[in-house]
Image (spheres, helix red, strand yellow):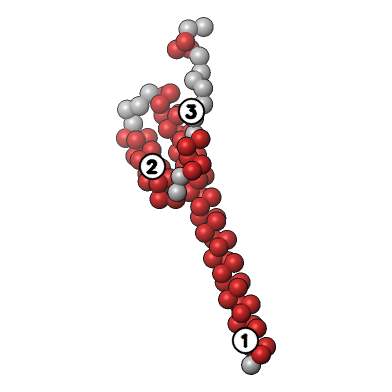
């Protein structure tokens, strides 16, 4: 089997784990733009798709974390308001 007939190894996506939301989102926008523009080889398109999926997952992780923090803050506020009502 020639080297061009062999499927490529999955791209290294380890750098995505350390990205902040804005950085991951911006790169995701760039990946989507490149995919939509076309003109890339199948191999490059697959690599872009995989990177885009990983970037989207990272963005979801950030948003889930933000949602949890907001929920916790709301719960603390509700608890504090409940304590104030009980004392009042």
- Which residue corresponds to the image point at 38% horizontal and 23% vertical from the top-left? 41
Question: Residue 31 location in percent, x, y?
Answer: 38, 38
Q: Residue at x 65, y 83 (%)?
A: 83
Q: Secondary structure at mark 1?
A: helix
- Residue 36 visible in this rendered orientation of the protein: no
Residue 64 sits in quarter: bottom right
- Name the foreground residue: 65 vs 33: 65
Q: Disc 1 marks which residue?
A: 84
In the image, is 10 to the left or to the right of 38? right
Q: Secondary structure at mark 2?
A: helix
Furthest residue toward right: 86
The residues bearing labels 2 and 1 have C-alpha atoms spaced at a distance of 46 Å
Measured Cα–Cα span from mark 3 to mark 2: 16 Å
Q: Which residue is mark 2?
A: 27
Q: Secondary structure at mark 3?
A: loop
State if disc 1 and disc 2 touch (CB < 8 Å).
no
* Figure check: 46 above or below 74: above
**Residue 20 in the image, given as x and y percentages of width and height:** 45, 49
Sequence-wise first label, 2 or 1: 2
Nearer the viewer's eye, disc 3 or disc 1? 1
Give how far across and how far down residue 63 sits, in percent.
Answer: 51, 55
Mark 2 vs mark 1, foreground winner is 1
Give 83 or 33, whichever is nearer the viewer: 83
Indicate which disc, 3 or 2, sits on the residue closer to the N terminus.
Answer: 3
User: Image point 48% across, 49% down: which residue?
Assistant: 59
| Contact? badges 3 and 2 (CB < 8 Å) | no
Taking the spot 51% from the left edge, 35% from the top edge, the residue there is 14
Determine crowd level at label 3: few under 14, some 14-19, many 20+ residues with C-alpha closer than 10 A.
few
Instruction: Tell me if I can see residue 4 in this picture.
Output: yes
Looking at the image, tell me whether mark 3 or mark 1 is earlier in sequence order.
3
User: Of the numbered discs in the image, which one, if any, rests on residue 11?
Assistant: 3
**Disc number at residue 28?**
none
């Amino acid at each position: 089997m020639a080297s061009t007939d062999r499927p490529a190894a999955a791209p290294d996506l380890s750098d995505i784990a350390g990205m902040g939301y804005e950085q991951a989102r911006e790169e995701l926008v760039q990946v989507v733009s490149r995919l939509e523009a076309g003109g890339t080889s199948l191999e490059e398109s697959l690599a872009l798709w995989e990177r885009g999926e990983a970037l989207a997952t990272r963005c979801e992780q950030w948003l889930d974390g933000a949602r949890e923090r907001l929920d916790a803050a709301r719960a603390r506020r509700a608890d504090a308001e409940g304590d104030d009502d009980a004392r009042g």
